[in-house]
Image (cartoon, rainbow, N blue to C red):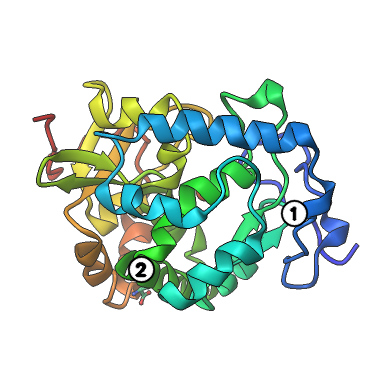
Amino acid sequence: MAVEPVVYGASERPPRGDYSRAQSDYTCAQNWSAYTEADHDTYRRLYERQSALLPGLACDAFIDALPSLGVRDRIPRFEEINERLKPATGWEIVAVPGLIPERPFFDLLAHRRFPVTDWIRTPAEFDYIVEPDVFHDLFGHVPLLFNPVFADYVQRYGAGGLKAHDLGAGEWLSRLYWYTIEFGLVRQSDGLRAYGAGILSSSSELRYSVTSPRPRRIALELLRCMRTRYKIDDFQATYFVIDSFAQLFEMTAPDFAPLYEAVRSLGELPADASMPSDSSITLG
Ligand code: PHE
Ligand code: FE
């Protein structure tokens, strides 16, 4: 085995991917010819269901970029997507066997290479899957890599991640990934919308995150966000809201070292915490 598989969170299960295929940077070849007709059909049905849910719930930038993924009736070849993605923003997608450890993950992002799991869920997992699969990674993450400002944010995040890792702050910075790139909401002129991949690829949480009165929605504040634990097996208790990708990019330009010191001394918050300083966003 070239690399060790990783287990995230409290999961008892071994990760599903075959890590013996991975190189030392955890990338592998997309095993495209191994997909069965049933695999392509699962992708096609997931794509169809999810794209029908987007209007009024997904942000405009995502809806505009989605067609850039290309074919929707089968699992795309990653090279086909890269032919469009590289000229658009300088990003490329690379296949991985599944979740990879923090350091190589940050390193890929810092080099504008986005890791995409190449296997697809079984039909029994159609509505919910714990680990990211090719549908989550492609449909959820890749469209916004065609957006220049968002693409720059993800690269900056990767570089910041390498630094955070060296400072022992990787877990805290990971919460910023979770609450922006995976579960972020944005205030558009016509209302709240989703831009996070975890929501955009979920048939149930997409509507919940944007319209349910139940969760907390708070204007993104870096320290608050990095102190806040998150749920991996349930809808989020808290969503953090930005006004634009430009705001997100600018907000993350400063040196984070003092923020990590502040997280260290102030400690963590539960996923559903409420703080007097929160700037809560109410549904319009
Ligand atoms: N600017 C941050 C630092 O210096 C890194 C960072 C960039 C973090 C983008 C998150 C997103 O540590
Ligand atoms: Fe993801």
| Position in image of residue 233 (x %, y %) | 53, 29
Picture coordinates of residue 281, whole percent (x, y): 13, 37
Label 2 CB-ligand 1 distance < 8 A: yes
Q: Is residue 284 above or below residue 34?
A: above
- The residue lying furthest to the right in this view is 1
Mark 2 packing: few (<14 Cα in 10 Å), some, or many (20+)?
Answer: many
Q: Which residue is drawn at the image coordinates 70% and 40% (left, top)?
A: 120
For this view, does 201 lie left or right of residue 102?
Answer: left
Q: Amino acid at mark 1?
A: Pro
* Residue at (29% x, 34% y) in the render: 55
Q: Earlier in the sequence, mark 1 or mark 2?
A: 1
- Image quadrant in which you'd find residue 36: top right
Q: Which mark is residue 153?
A: 2
Left or right, 39 with respect to 76, comes to: right
Report the residue marked by disc 1.
97
Q: Quadrant of the C terminus?
A: top left
Task: Give whichever of 40, 140 is nearer the camera.
Answer: 40
Given the image, on which type of amino acid does mark 2 rest? Tyr
